[in-house]
Amino acid sequence: MRHHPSMPRPRLSCVCCAAIIAAIATPVHADLPGEALAAAKKATSFLVEQVSTEGGYLWRYSADLKHREGEGVVETSTVWVQPPGTPAVGQAFVQLFQATGDRQFLDAARAAAESLRRGQMQSGGWQAMVEFEPERRRRWAYRVDPAGSKAKDQSSLDDDKTQSALRFLIQLDRALEFKDESIHEMTHYGFQLQSNVPQLRKKYERITRLTPKQLAESGANRPPSPRVVQEIIDRQDERGAWLSDEAMRYHRVPGPTINMDVAVEHLTTLAEYLAAVDQ
């Protein structure tokens, strides 16, 4: 029947709309906290055992892990510091450990910190990447290596490189109650840099004075909704990876890809949810 302009248009009732939305929405499972923890552990195992290099991470990997990228093609034993590289992934592991107390996440965070320890410059900060192959390492004045006359000592404060490393180490140091001498010393050594690093030091000193309860309250945000958490769980593949459709930017290889920004976002969301349901 042709609709006449003078006739009122039919409208869906609120009840009908709600029913449609409920029908197409992702169903939330009964044991969502258990599934969220399992998904986080599965993703962590995949990242640590199959993706990481010397405990650290790049920005992007092909789904089959044959192609690797940071800010360019990477074909060597190299990890990235600039977000969403090693510090960003490590910080997500720290949040998961703080939310659950599960040492798998702490071990993963320690491995990321060790990767950064081997990449800290004599000047206290970090470059965009950390090299692990001997020939490539000789170009840089890493603290842990014998100083070479031609080695470049350059700590970068551009693009959140050194700052992101220090933020991660501060959180890990706090989670370990400042009892790991290596991490504690590495953090303080980085504070010798200028620019906005002194601001990080002040934040660090404030954190050291907080009780566990105050620390939890200071970082309290509105927890993720159960439906968002369920969608993250459902998107995970059998290995524990989250795949994105975008292509490998520098290899010019079509997707799917494994992006660290997506992994960090999902791990952080799971950590926030698990912290909230544990209260």
Image (cartoon, helix red, strand yellow):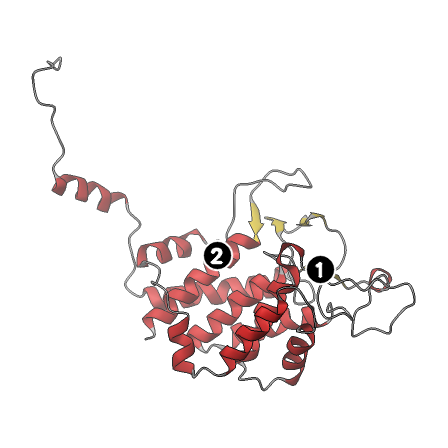
Q: Is residue 138 left or right of residue 109?
A: right
Q: Which amino acid lies under the numbered mark 2 shown in the image of this protein?
A: Glu
Give the residue drawn at x 76%, y 69%.
123
- Percent of width and height locating residue 150: 91, 63
For marks 2 and 1, give the one nearer the viewer.
Answer: 1
Q: Residue at x 48, y 74 (%)?
A: 97
Q: Quadrant of residue 133?
A: bottom right
For label 1, the residue is 156
Check the picture and name the quadrant holding the C terminus: bottom left
* Residue 247 picture location, percent across and down: 59, 40
Residue drawn 65% across and 85% down? Answer: 181
Residue 161: horizontal and vertical position, in percent? 65, 60
Q: Residue furthest bottom?
A: 179
Query: Quick one: SS at disc 1?
Result: loop
| Viewer-proximal residue among 222 and 124 | 124
Label 2 close to label 1 by CB (< 8 Å) = no
Q: Which mark is residue 36?
A: none
- Work out whether 107 lies above or below 71: below
The alpha-carbon separation of the residues under discs 2 and 1 comes to 25 Å
Q: Earlier in the sequence, mark 2 or mark 1?
A: 1
Task: Work out which quarter of the rendered image holds the N terminus and state it.
Answer: top left
Viewer can see residue 176: yes
- Circle 1 Cα neighbour tier, 10 Å, few/some/many (<14 / 14–19 / ≥20): some
Which residue is more in the foreground, 185 or 261? 185
Label 2: which residue?
265
